[in-house]
Amino acid sequence: MNHTTDERTTLLQAWINQHYDMDEKSFNAVSGDASFRRYFRFIAKDAESKDNVSFIAVDAPPQLESSQTFIKIAQLLAKNNVPVPTIYKYDLERGFYTQEDFGNQLLLESLNDQTADQLYIQAINHIADMQKVDSTSLPIYDSQLLQTEMNLFTDWFLIKHLNLSLTEKQIDILRACYELLEKNALEQPQVFVHRDYHSRNIMMLDNNCLGIIDFQDAVKGPISYDLVSLLRDCYINWPQDKLKQCIYYFHQHYTNDIPLDTFTRWFDLMGIQRHLKATGIFCRLNYRDGKPNYLDDVPRTLNYIKQVSEKYIELSELNKLIKSL
């Protein structure tokens, strides 16, 4: 642990003690995520019931993370009955806050052939709940953001990770592909998008209910985005027939005014945009942030791009490029 983090941990503990009757021995780090936020669990007496309650304290250095955005979106989602952790105390200036403890059990760890259908239907219904949320105050998933994300694939995967010098032809193929994917994203109905909705950002709560975390990057964007994040998850994959059933379920219940083949195309191409971005981010997490474990997820993510680009003639050049790598 470096000097600054150590100092921040001490400050965080002092701040908690101002607001809670904390059991000092219970204060422990909880595994983090791909951001610069750090999480700690502690036990304290509840002010009203006097029972011992478990809380999560978050250290989000203000120069690196916006706690204000996180709290604003948490309150917006909670107001619309989306199951997100309640935020209790916060100090925006220092980047400290406490929130409800959703436990340690990720959806990822609970998925198997017996449980998947019921859990995915619940997770899909929560996408529909989020899409009802008023997204007018959120950043827009515009052309610039879509292109910036896809360029992570070029910069961090092709150039940094594979050490490629791209030819003019390869640059043209990528540019045409990125334009197609951008157009696909922008022609869809634009709604509240969690933007990282997958099996490691959904928690198992009591009674097999789900809780949603890590929504601070939410935007107003394409209707198919969260569904493809969930179903073509970078951390687990499912047979095509299960995928089709889930797409059909979402379509029948929530977008049946759009032809199914149109929606499926939106979904497929949106997934390629997301997986190009994710491949780049996994490499950046390794080289820039010293988090090498994410490289393990690159092959699955690339495989999605390869499989889906095979279906579409417009993506045949991208398909050839990926195969050649």
Image (cartoon, grey):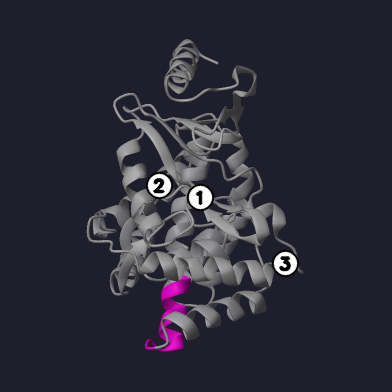
Three-letter code for the amino acid on which mark 1 is drawn: Thr
The overriding secondary structure of the stretch rendered in magenta is helix
Q: Which residue is mark 2?
A: 152
Can you see residue 66?
Answer: no
Image side of residue 131 versus residue 230, left or right: left
Tell me the quarter of the image containing the C terminus.
bottom right
Image side of residue 155 versus residue 190, left or right: right
Give the camera-side residue of 262 and 253.
Answer: 253
Q: CA distance from mark 1 to mark 2?
A: 8 Å
Tell me the quarter of the image containing the N terminus.
top right
Whichever of callouts 2 and 3 sits on the residue coming sooner in the sequence is: 3
Q: Quadrant of residue 302?
A: bottom right
Give the camera-side residue of 272 and 237.
Answer: 237
Residue at disc 3, secondary structure:
loop
Q: Which residue is mark 3?
A: 115
**Residue 279 tag number:** 1
Residue at disc 2, secondary structure:
helix
Q: Residue at x 48, y 72 (%)?
A: 268
Residue 259 lies in the magenta stretch: yes
Image side of residue 219 versus residue 100, left or right: left
Three-letter code for the amino acid on which mark 3 is drawn: Thr
- What span is colored magenta in the figure? 257-268
Residue at disc 1, secondary structure:
helix
Q: Local crowd at mark 3 within 10 Å, few (<14), some, or many (≥20)?
A: few
Give the camera-side residue of 151 and 319.
Answer: 151
Q: Nearer the viewer, mark 2 or mark 3?
A: 3
Q: CA distance from mark 1 to mark 3?
A: 28 Å
Label 1 close to label 2 by CB (< 8 Å): yes
183 vs 33: above or below: below
117 vs 48: above or below: below
Residue 283 lies in the magenta stretch: no
